[in-house]
Amino acid sequence: MSHYITTHNADGKSVFSKLITEHHEVHIPIGTIKNVWSSHEFPMNLSTEADIEQYKHDRANKFFPGDRRICPQSGTATCIINMNPGAESEFHRTMTLDTIVVLEGEIELHLDSGEKQVAKAGDTIVQRGTMHKWVNVTPGGGWARWVAFIQIIEEPLEIGNRTLRSEWAD
């Protein structure tokens, strides 16, 4: 799978960057994750290629530093997740707003309230600091694949009399 990033030449014309041309896939317990893009500031400064250099560094690591893990502490991330047939994640929460588009297969989203929802190819999910886990329920034992657009949120979350923070099963 190719990976294309645009930038600008000295005349301000849009061109394709030569710095990165392939995806880097990292193995995780439920399958693989590809960091499609990450930024460490928002809004982003695109006047130089410092963001591309930072992304080159980010994609070589499994998780970002800090308790968000799937997103830089002060930025954004876009990832493609490939979930092994029949795989099930642990419950976890990140202090992020995640917009998810299911590309292939079927994933069942479990919430800590006990609610569940199956999402199929083409479906979208928006998670708002959600305690959740994923289960691949693709018929016939197939893979599930989705893209996640991840943005940081103000933390902690104050819901009623509870304070919610990032939580990961270790």
Image (cartoon, rainbow, N blue to C red):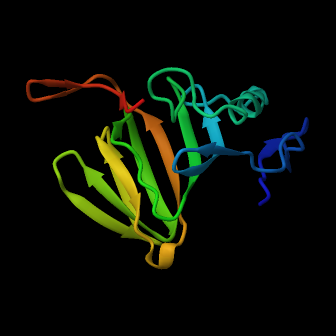
Q: Is residue 138 left or right of residue 167?
A: right
Q: Nearer the viewer, residue 152 or 30?
A: 30
Q: Nearer the viewer, residue 126 or 139?
A: 139
Image location of residue 133, percent across then percent down: 35, 48
Q: Is residue 46 left or right of residue 142?
A: right
Is the residue 163 above or below the residue 107 in the image? above
Image quarter for residue 27? Answer: top right
Image location of residue 55, percent across then percent down: 71, 33
Is the residue 94 above or below the residue 20 in the image? above
Q: Residue at x 38, y 53 (%)?
A: 134
Image quarter for residue 95? Answer: top left
Q: Is residue 17 left or right of residue 121?
A: right
Q: Nearer the viewer, residue 65 or 56?
A: 65
Instruction: Work out which quarter of the rendered image holds the C terminus and state it.
Output: top left
Outermost left residue? 161
Q: Residue at x 85, y 44 (%)?
A: 17
Instruction: Work out which quarter of the rendered image holds the N terminus and state it.
Output: bottom right
Q: Residue at x 9, y 29 (%)?
A: 160
Image location of residue 169, percent across then percent down: 38, 33
Q: Residue at x 80, y 58 (%)?
A: 2
